[in-house]
Image: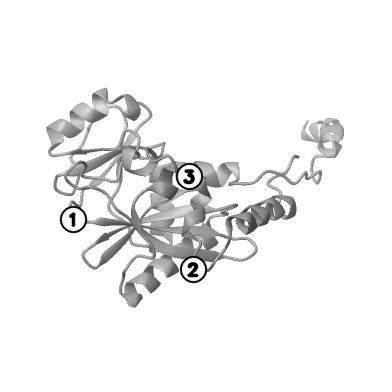
Amino acid sequence: GIPYTGPTRSSAALAMDKLAFASLLESRNLRRLPRISYADAVDRSPDFPAPYIVKPRYGGSSIGTQVVEDEAALAALIEHGAHMRDGAVVEPFLPDSIDLNVGLRRFPELQVSAIERPLRNAELSPILGYADKYTSTEGMAGAPRELPADLPEQLAEELRTSALVVGAQLPVRGVARLDFLLDGSDLYVNELNTIPGSFAKYLWIEPTVPFEQLLQDMIAEAKARPTYRPVTEGADGSILRDAGSIAAKLH
């Protein structure tokens, strides 16, 4: 019963499972890339063309995520990749897409931060990988970015609206970071990080939320909205006490 900050077990598990999170997006008619799952081997061909981006079904920080050029490489990675032992998800790889992120919180009210565009060296890596995100001494807070991202207002509003839908559907606690992909004019919801590096503190410039205030709000939320609420209704022993009489009536 000790209050804690951050996501509930159920919301963290849902966001960590890339296939389950994709189902949530689909249920709310939010645009996402096709995402299919594989277990130990490729037993069917993807219904979209190569190249493919392959991710561990459970995991984060881009660890284990790779781009492959054909089905043979896909099969080899899923069969032998150390990070794919618990399953993998496969999506079409969009080489010209850009990453966009927002911070998201529900306390004291549902809010979306400024939109950032993380910057990467496309010549060194086809994706925004672990090194891009975390090798800076400040982690994501020190990674190169465009903040706020230079986007047409209509596109920015579409992104914010999608983020609010996700925030309303998933019981986000603390601060989460929602990641998008932009391919031309097509915007896709990608993944949700329920415990982002640095609490995504650097994103809160519009609206302005100082880091101290962010932490105070997280603590206040933990006290006001505990994740465990003891319930005794239906568990007071009456069913067990009556079991004998119920059994007698059945004979």
Residue 109 in the image: above or below residue 247:
below
Res 41 visible = no
Can the viewer see residue 186? yes
Q: Looking at the image, which residue is at 25% across and 25% down?
A: 79
Q: In the rendered view, does 42 fall on the left or right side of 58?
A: left
Residues at marks 3 and 2, CA–CA distance in whole angstroms: 19 Å
Q: Secondary structure at mark 1?
A: loop
Residue 120 in picture, x, y percent from top left? 26, 49
Circle 2 residue: 206
- For badge 1, the amino acid type reads Asp
Say which residue appears at 82% left-offset and 33% top-offset: 240
Q: Which residue has dot 3 on it?
A: 197
Q: Residue 83 falls in which quadrant of the image?
A: top left
Q: Residues within 10 Å of mark 2 (few under 14, many from 20)?
A: few
Label 1 – label 3 distance at C-alpha:
26 Å
Residue drawn at x 21%, y 42% is: 125
Type of amino acid under label 2: Glu
> Viewer-proximal residue, 168 or 235?
168
Near mark 3 (Cα within 10 A), the count class, few <14, some 14-19 or many ≥20, is some
Q: Name the image quarter holding the C terminus.
A: top right
Between circles 1 and 2, the one closer to the viewer is 2
- Residue type, numbered disc 3: Gly
Secondary-structure class at tag 2? loop
Other-residue count near label 1 (Cα within 10 Å), few / some / many at <14 / 14–19 / ≥20: few
Q: Are marks 3 and 2 in contact (CB under 8 Å)?
A: no
User: Which residue is identified by label 1?
Assistant: 96
Q: Quadrant of residue 247?
A: top right
Q: Nearer the viewer, residue 66 or 121?
A: 121
